[in-house]
Image (cartoon, helix red, strand yellow):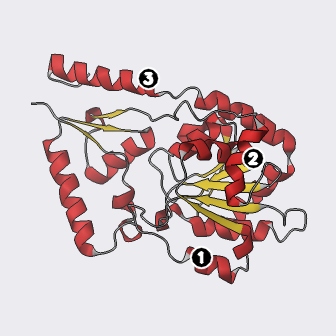
Amino acid sequence: MKKIVAIHDVIAEKYPALIFPNRINRTLWNLKVWLAIKQADLIMTVSEFSRQGIIEHFGISGENIRVVSEAADKDFRPIHETNLLSAKLAPFGLDISTRYILYVGGIAPHKNLSTLINAYSGLIKDSRHNDIKLVLVGDYESDVFLVDNNLKVLIKKLHITDNVIFTGFISDEELVCFYNAALVFGLPSFMEGFGLPAVEAMACGTPVIGSKTTALPEVLGDAGLFFDPNKPDELLEHLTIIIENGELRKKLALRSIQRASTFSWQKSAVQVLNVFNNLKSNGTIS
């Protein structure tokens, strides 16, 4: 029987110290991936960025790897009903008049949230921006990866505890409203295999700033702004530009919606079926 293995990214291989709590977990992970690759007739992944990472790390021929992209669910869209937005934001102490920067994803060390927090701290030192909040959406209690427990320590040290909101896990019905009401969405990860939250944000017309050491430049194209994840000052500069330039936000919002529309789960499903059918009928990859 032909076997196809999906490898989303090589984050665990590139940043093991930020992923695994101990050496045993790392060893078991490496063994599992090695066994999967050894049996695979074909590998699928989610971006050209991840494809190149797999080639380089595992020494696999690129001819045996196919890219099938991800997409935002159709529920992620621009919402103009202010009453709906207000109702979903209110339980978290927010409303549609609140200016905030949004992050959505894991609360793991490789997500590099300390860089976002440091950049945000610098931003609100400017009296013109000291009303802006930072909203971090993610399940910090049961993340499948390590949880960065140093974040709240950093926030307290920077004296911005009252300015940063941890929502914990929220539903998609709530999340789409958070995207819509945000000034800008930030994804500062050291590595992302695709960056699905960024595509969800784009589908809602939210400007995105992302790390350039990830798949985000490939996925977002000219709809996003990019920075070095090791340089909080560079992120701060981009945040300031977007927040102070309403015309740029409008331009990026339009580009974002258009770019997000190029991804769909229907397209992805067709790509997967084509891979299956080619492998089944020919016994080879085409």
Question: Which residue is identified by label 3?
Answer: 266
Q: Nearer the viewer, residue 199 or 92?
A: 92
Q: Nearer the viewer, residue 193 or 74?
A: 74
Question: Which residue is identified by label 1?
Answer: 152
If the image is split into quadrants, where does the C terminus sit? top left
Q: Residue at x 26, y 51 (%)?
A: 58
Instruction: Say which element carries label 2.
Output: helix
Kind of residue at badge 2: Ser
Q: Residue furthest left?
A: 1
Instruction: Say which element carries label 3.
Output: helix
Q: Residue at x 68, y 57 (%)?
A: 91
Question: Which residue is identified by label 2?
Answer: 86
Question: In this picture, is 27 found above or below 247?
Answer: below
- Mark 3 or 2, nearer chain start: 2
Q: Quadrant of residue 150?
A: bottom right
Q: Nearer the viewer, residue 142 or 122?
A: 142
Kind of residue at badge 3: Gln
Q: Residue furthest bottom?
A: 157
